[in-house]
Amino acid sequence: MNTPVYIAGVGMTQFGRHIERSLQSLAQEALDAALSDAGAAIKDINQAYYAGVTQSPLQGQIAIPGQVVFSKIGLTGLPVYNVENACASGTSAFQLAVQALRAGSCDVALALGAEKMNVEDKTRALAVFEGGWDVLTADENADRLIALGAGVEVPPGSESSRPYSRFMAIYAAMCRHWMKSFGTTQRQIAAVASKNHMHSMHNPLAQYRVPFTIEEVLAAAPITYPLTMPMCSPLSDGAAAVIVCTEAGLKKLGLDRRRAIRVAATAIATATPRAADEFDKAVCRRAANAAYEQAGLGPEDVSVAEVHDASAMGEIMAVEYLGLTPMGGGGAAAEAGELSIGGRIPVNTSGGLECKGHPIGATGLGQIHELVTQLRGEAGARQVANAKVAVQENGGGSIGFEEAVVTINVLTR
């Protein structure tokens, strides 16, 4: 665990609807950008980890998705590992690459995630999310989670008649659970979405770059109370890549050390049986505590964060579990501007999943791309002043009352 590991290069496509592009072309663009950023060549990569979730259900590529994609972009002959961990797949691939370096099995490794989620039949794409829990008890799972929102009055006209994934109803139930437990308001949730849309204006790789005020978020088309359209992440296509290396790898690449970002901690936790109100036992809290202990840092040291906001409520929950705000304080912090660029602890400077996009296998690596850019001081108009410590949180799937898996990474300049 004491072996220093560094991020040498990052690259990603713009996330969005890339109907005319192939998965291969998206992966190629992300790889080329990461290689260029690291000053590396394909021959320098010793091992590769591929994150992808939708190739099986949407393209029929049931097995070896990484080998298939890599064979088309010049990554052949080296060890390749396929990683599926729901929406945390990209970060899981990154963590495995880091573990390989720490184990001494190689000096330079690649984590790459890619997805093509936009297909003609949107219902097929939405159905992918139904595989993110125990499919044998799907109705029971949904009933248990939706019941969390019981007791909150739903205003007339705040429910869409359009068909959405029932995970939207579950996200809404979590919002209502926080409303009952902590007094979180719909306006505070809208403040998160507004903030992230404002941040995304300055991110050329974001899927959405249109600003929204809090009032505009509240007045937007409803999905399921209290969620409106701008509070939720879209279906996205895209790819992202991260190259990691040891000290020996840095020397081999000849990288300017000022641009090498250290991986101070990498932690992962999975769900455990707990009551819905046992917040200290939450999987995100447990993973965060492990990461902070490993890094020898605490939430008070964090300069900037990227967290998993498949809905705006996800950001509120994450910042609370990460200790960036007190439990129940995430919404108020967002409304007060504390989580905005220029605020106490900027969160989702990229625009987050709501605006940057959410191509499942690439999502976590896209978060790392943003944090590396911030720590290098290369984020332009969205730059966080004097950013030194970054935390990334990426969750996926559902078991019990929480995510099936949460990955946390701490990066330092």
Image (cartoon, rainbow, N blue to C red):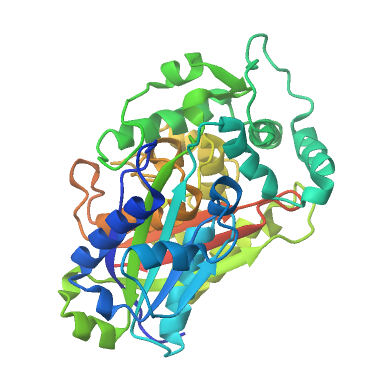
Query: In this orientation, which residue lies closer to the viewer: 211 or 27?
Result: 27
Query: In this orientation, which residue lies closer to the viewer: 323 or 375?
Result: 375
Q: Quadrant of the C terminus?
A: bottom left
Q: Name the outermost residue toward the top.
A: 156
Residue 366, position as x, y percentages in the image: 38, 53
Q: Is residue 290 left or right of residue 143?
A: left
Q: Is residue 265 left or right of residue 121?
A: left
Q: Name the outermost residue toward the bottom.
A: 104
Count of labels in the image: 0
Query: In this orientation, which residue lies closer to the viewer: 113 or 205?
Result: 113
Residue 241, position as x, y percentages in the image: 35, 61
Considering only vertical position in the picture, is 118 above or below 392? above
Q: Is residue 381 left or right of residue 217?
A: left
Q: Residue at x 36, y 36 (%)?
A: 207
In this orientation, does residue 339 appear?
no
Considering only vertical position in the picture, is 68 above or below 183? below
Q: Quadrant of residue 227?
A: top right
Considering only vertical position in the picture, is 376 above or below 249? above
Residue 245, position as x, y percentages in the image: 32, 79
In this orientation, does residue 124 appear?
yes
Q: Residue at x 34, y 44 (%)?
A: 350
Query: In this orientation, which residue lies closer to the viewer: 241 or 405?
Result: 241
Residue 153, position as x, y percentages in the image: 73, 18
Q: Quadrant of residue 16?
A: top left
Q: Is residue 52 left or right of residue 346?
A: right
